[in-house]
């Protein structure tokens, strides 16, 4: 499957096939992720399909499972087989915790209750979801392009259940389940019933954020263990505020590793870095959207507004343009009319007080030609008049 077909959101059939591949053909990966020396607690990362779960072994024979996975054919067997391959019995799971009521987290809670008599803990704010078996994505707003693309395939229904332990406003100690830690309810940003799970130097954050990913082999793959915004939230403003709340909990408890349910883990450093860079990301991504819009309209004044005097563009074909050459070739005198020009999936790679590097995907449609998507890396400098674009490099997404 060619990468540009994955990137092009208008090709819904391709995207549907991609997600079917992700959800149905993924193999499981299990490994010990971390070890806490004081209590000999271990965290095992179980990566099945597009959903992930974590198995925690305390200083007894008891286990805790965090997340129950997606409600699709084959996942239950894959989850149980993963646990057995680690040398454990599902019957040893003293508690399963679902961080919120979406189907890729709570999808097999009822199965675990019925088959292995495993008690389930869930947030009170998501009781309606649990009892109806509905993800209710209609209540969420898209906060990135991936939300728009994945929404039709993420509104999963699952077998309804009632949690054995309903977490309201107070934390729940996990000592009775053989683990030194606690369940921490937070104000619902992703969903009303968001939960964190703190176990020694590890903090499980559900979908408060996700790890970075990239398009690869027709699907999505982890990319560098950095923090990025989730695809959708029921309360975007509250979800943003929760990031600082999670950071404080992590710092106060000397947490070293954060585990989002998708594409983790990440370090506390990466969360702090993301929080600090988020305002800059919003500024530069808006500025880049303005550049593309004015390029499409043929406005020449974008040079003075956005580009530094020594601006250089290097294309995916190896061509190089100076500031004036860029304006002539792309804005004022293009040889072929630009029909559409769009950017998405912005991310700050690194930044300092006066320099920043940002990446994103850019899709260009020339008159009479197919749309092409390239991976763009840009370097900005902060001058007296604001952030100016100094260097832009485009690269093909596939060979």
Image (cartoon, helix red, strand yellow):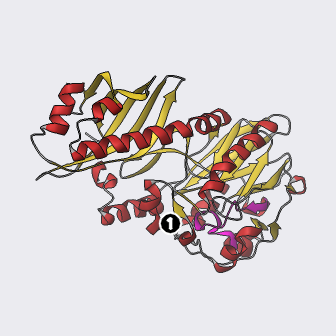
The image shows a total of numbered marks equal to 1
The correct choice, above or below, for 332 with respect to 44 in the image is above
Q: Residue at x 79, y 59 (%)?
A: 92
Residue 70 on image: x %, y %: 57, 65
Residue 264 on image: x %, y %: 59, 45
Residue 5 on image: x %, y %: 28, 54
Q: Nearer the viewer, residue 106 or 363?
A: 363
Q: Nearer the viewer, residue 67 or 226?
A: 226
The correct choice, above or below, for 55 with respect to 21 in the image is above
The answer to whether residue 243 is seen in the rendering is yes
For residue 265, side relative to residue 173 (left or right): left
What secondary structure is marked by label 1?
helix
Please identify the quarter of the rendering in which residue 21 is found: bottom left
The correct choice, above or below, for 269 with respect to 260 in the image is above
The answer to whether residue 87 is seen in the rendering is no
Q: Residue furthest top?
A: 310
Residue 289 on image: x %, y %: 36, 44
Q: Magenta part of the protein: which range?
A: 93-110
User: Is disc 1 surrounded by few (<14), some (14 to 19) or many (20+) residues within 10 Å?
Assistant: some
For residue 361, side relative to residue 116 (left or right): left
Q: Is residue 187 magenta?
A: no
Q: Residue at x 42, y 43 (%)?
A: 286
The correct choice, above or below, for 383 with respect to 209 in the image is above
Q: Residue at x 34, y 36 (%)?
A: 376
For residue 80, side relative to residue 21 (left or right): right
Please identify the quarter of the rendering in which residue 128 is found: bottom right
Please identify the quarter of the rendering in which residue 114 is found: bottom right
Q: Quadrant of the C terminus?
A: top left
Q: Is residue 100 magenta?
A: yes
Residue on which the image places disc 1: 154
């Amino acid at each position: 499957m060619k990468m540009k077909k994955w990137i092009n959101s208008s090709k819904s059939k391709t995207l549907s096939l991609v997600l079917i591949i992700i959800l149905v053909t993924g193999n499981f990966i299990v490994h010990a992720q971390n070890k806490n020396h004081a209590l000999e607690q271990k965290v095992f990362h179980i990566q099945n399909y597009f959903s992930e779960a974590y198995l925690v072994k305390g200083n007894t024979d008891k286990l805790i499972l965090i997340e129950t996975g997606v409600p699709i054919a084959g996942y239950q067997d894959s989850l149980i087989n993963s646990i057995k391959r680690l040398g454990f019995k599902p019957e040893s799971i003293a508690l399963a915790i679902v961080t919120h009521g979406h189907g890729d987290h709570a999808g097999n809670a009822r199965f675990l209750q019925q088959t292995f008599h495993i008690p389930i803990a869930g947030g009170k704010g998501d009781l309606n979801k649990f009892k109806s078996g509905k993800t209710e994505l209609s209540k969420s707003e898209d906060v990135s392009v991936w939300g728009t693309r994945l929404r039709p395939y993420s509104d999963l229904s699952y077998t309804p259940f009632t949690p054995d332990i309903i977490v309201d406003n107070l934390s729940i100690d996990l000592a009775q389940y053989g683990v030194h830690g606690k369940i921490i309810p937070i104000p619902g940003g992703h969903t009303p019933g968001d939960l964190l799970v703190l176990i020694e130097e590890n903090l499980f954050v559900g979908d408060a954020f996700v790890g970075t990913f990239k398009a690869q082999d027709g699907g999505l793959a982890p990319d560098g263990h950095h923090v990025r915004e989730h695809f959708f939230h029921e309360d975007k403003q509250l979800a943003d505020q929760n990031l600082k709340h999670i950071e404080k909990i992590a710092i106060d408890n000397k947490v070293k590793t954060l585990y989002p349910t998708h594409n983790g883990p990440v370090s506390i450093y990466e969360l702090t870095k993301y929080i600090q860079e988020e305002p800059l990301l919003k500024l530069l991504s808006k500025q880049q959207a303005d550049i593309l819009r004015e390029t499409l309209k043929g406005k020449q004044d974008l040079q003075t507004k956005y580009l530094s005097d020594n601006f250089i563009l290097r294309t995916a074909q190896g061509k190089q343009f100076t500031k004036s050459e860029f304006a002539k070739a792309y804005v004022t005198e293009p040889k072929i009319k630009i029909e559409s020009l769009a950017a998405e999936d912005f991310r700050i790679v690194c930044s300092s007080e006066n320099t920043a590097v940002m990446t994103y995907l850019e899709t260009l449609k020339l008159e009479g030609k197919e749309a092409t998507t390239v991976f763009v890396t840009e370097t900005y400098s902060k001058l007296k008049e604001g952030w100016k674009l100094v260097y832009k490099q485009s690269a093909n997404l596939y060979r």
